[in-house]
Image: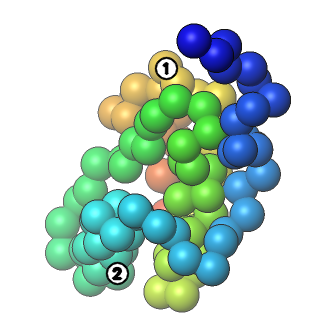
Amino acid sequence: MAKFRKQDNPFRPGTATRPGHLAGREKEQEMLAMALQFIKAKSSPMAPIRIVGPRGVGKSTLLVEAKRMAEEHQIHVVRATKLASLDPDGPLTRNILAGMENKKR
């Protein structure tokens, strides 16, 4: 059995460039589009969306696409990294959201 080596991985984690087509991500794009519609309509509060997965599967690329989609709808985007233990209902999240609310005024 051949041993897998890190350099054999065709993915380059961290590049986060948007390809011409996000193959296999239709479900995620639909979910993001629906979330953006709710946000734009202000029809209901939404919990933060968490995108998780192993290294190299395209999380950052999906986030780049989500940012592009949000900006098309004039929705402010906040990016935070390395917050794996972030409590979506905790004080940091509340402060970020409060700051965004103040920015809109």
Instruction: Kindly identify the residue that appears in the image at 47 percent across and 86 percent down.
Output: 73
Q: Quadrant of the C terminus?
A: bottom right
Which one is in front, 88 or 82?
82
| Residue 59 pos. (x, y %) | 55, 47
Question: Toward which corner of the image does residue 4 lie, by quadrant?
Answer: top right
In the rendered image, the vertical position of residue 22 relative to residue 85, given as above or below = below
**Is label 1 in a helix, a strand or a loop?**
loop
Query: Horizontal placement of 62 versus 17: left or right?
Result: left
Q: Local crowd at mark 2 within 10 Å, few (<14), some, or many (≥20)?
A: some
Amino acid beneath label 1: Ser
Q: Which residue is mark 1?
A: 85
| Residue 101 pos. (x, y %) | 49, 64
Q: Which residue is mark 2?
A: 40
Q: Quadrant of the N terminus?
A: top right
In whole angstroms, how far apart are the C-alphas of marks 1 and 2?
28 Å
Outermost residue to the left? 44
Instruction: Kindly identify the residue that appears in the image at 74 percent across and 20 percent down.
Output: 5
Q: Local crowd at mark 1 within 10 Å, few (<14), some, or many (≥20)?
A: few
Amino acid beneath label 2: Lys
Question: Toward which corner of the image does residue 8 lie, by quadrant?
Answer: top right
